[in-house]
Amino acid sequence: MTNELDLRQYMMILRKRLLVIISFVVICSAAAAAYSIFLKDKMYEASTKIIVNQTSSQLATTQLDINQINTNIRMIDTYKEIIKTPAILDKVEERFPQLGFTAEQLARKIKVSSVNNTQVMTLVVQDADYRKAAETVNAVSTVFQEEIQHIFKVENVSILNNADVEAQPSPVSPNVPLNIAIAFVVSLMLAVGVVFLLEYLDDTIKTEADVQEYLGLPTLAMVSKMNSEEAHTSQSQKAVHTYKAGELERVTLEK
């Protein structure tokens, strides 16, 4: 016989320790929910969109220059890096001291993204105060639009929309359902793994098959396990069982 477990044995192991698995998963999921709702700081997100387009002189010709458009698209990768440099963020820190951010802090807070083959960039800032996030991303966009003209000597950056400072959006973090789902999956995997590990480390003999496998001997008898209710019932039956005189069971014959 081999030590490999078949599917039925796996199911028996899980069923035997089902209460432990459920308890562990419920506790971990509840802890994740409590942390996300009561302890984790809420974060709000504000964004602006910037388009890299043709210069004013080119727009006046009312002709689309495909080469120029392709150049603008390629320039976006350069602009995404420039936005986070001291050339821009030092100006933001200097002109908007009320924000309370240094250039290094701004570089960590700003996220810049773009969709492939488009001339649009998106600037995103997250903060515990939505109004502060909106003011910060608007300030960075404004300074970038002004300073890029001096850096590249071109006027091909326009702000499509600023963040609405007066808006009252819902927080983007923490994502309570997602955190609970992650805690549920991870705790379930851990609980099942621990259950199988405990079963693997348990080398006690429990069944006739175990006796035959480890000792190579047949089983002569087994002591069945009784719960307290069954034991009490058995003792009660013995106590009330009496014999009557003259019963054949009590008569012996001698030759």
Image (cartoon, grey):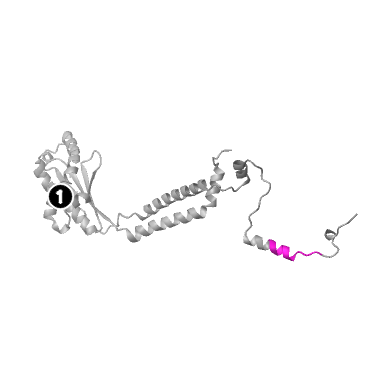
Residue 13 as seen in the image, left or right of residue 51:
right
Which residue appears at 16% of the width and 44% of the height? Answer: 82
- Dividing the image into 4 quarters, which one contains the C terminus? bottom right
Residue 176 as seen in the image, left or right of residue 116:
right
Residue in the foreground of this view, choosing between 251 and 224: 251
Residue under circle 1? 89
Which residue appears at 52% of the width and 49% of the height? Answer: 14
Is residue 242 visible to us here? yes
Residue in the foreground of this view, choosing between 104 and 224: 224
Residue 63 as seen in the image, left or right of residue 46:
left
- 241 shown above or below 161: below
Residue in the foreground of this view, choosing between 198 and 130: 198
Q: Residue furthest top?
A: 67
- Residue 240 within the magenta-colored segment of the rendering: yes
Which residue appears at 33% of the width and 60% of the height? Answer: 39
Which residue appears at 13% of the width and 50% of the height? Answer: 90
Q: Three-letter amino acid code at disc 1?
A: Leu
Counting from the top left corner in percent of width and height, residue 148 is at 12, 44
- Residue 215 within the magenta-colored segment of the rendering: no
Secondary structure mostly seen in magenta is: helix
- 104 shown above or below 66: below
Residue 238 as seen in the image, left or right of residue 205:
right
Q: Residue furthest right?
A: 255
Q: Which residues are magenta?
A: 234-243
Secondary structure beneath dot 1 equals helix
Counting from the top left corner in percent of width and height, residue 21 is at 48, 53
Is residue 161 visible to us here? no
- Dividing the image into 4 quarters, which one contains the N terminus? top right
